[in-house]
Image (cartoon, grey):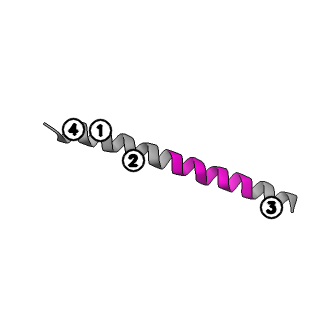
Amino acid sequence: MQRANKQFKRDSARVAFLVCVGFGAEVLCGNIGIACFTP
């Protein structure tokens, strides 16, 4: 049970990290895209 809990914590941390990275990249790309495509 302890091992499964540790595994779950690691996986949820990884998922949260990926969500944060994905969201940050999306915002960054959106801002760059707006900056590039607006005259």
Amino acid at pointer 1? Ile
19 drawn magenta: yes
Q: Do the residues labelled 4 and 2 touch (CB within 8 Å)?
A: no
Give the CA separation, mark 4 to mark 2. Answer: 15 Å
Q: What stretch is highlighted in magenta?
A: 8-20
- Badge number at residue 4: 3
Question: Farthest right residue?
Answer: 1
- Badge number at residue 32: 1
Amino acid at pointer 4? Cys
Quadrant where the image shows the N terminus: bottom right
Q: Is the magenta stretch mostly helix, strand or loop?
A: helix
Q: What element carries label 4?
A: helix
Q: Do the residues labelled 3 and 2 touch (CB within 8 Å)?
A: no
Q: Is mark 1 on a helix, strand or loop?
A: helix
Amino acid at pointer 2? Glu
Q: Where is residue 12 in the image (x, y as percent from the top left)?
A: 66, 55
Q: What element carries label 2?
A: helix
14 drawn magenta: yes
The numbered mark, 3 or 1, whose residue comes first in the sequence reads 3
List the residue tagged with mark 4.
Answer: 36
**Dot 1 crowding, Cα within 10 Å, few <14, some 14–19, many 20+:** few
The numbered mark, 4 or 2, whose residue comes first in the sequence reads 2
Give the CA separation, mark 3 to mark 1. Answer: 41 Å
Give the CA separation, mark 3 to mark 2. Answer: 32 Å
Q: Is mark 3 on a helix, strand or loop?
A: helix
Q: Are marks 4 and 1 in contact (CB under 8 Å)?
A: yes
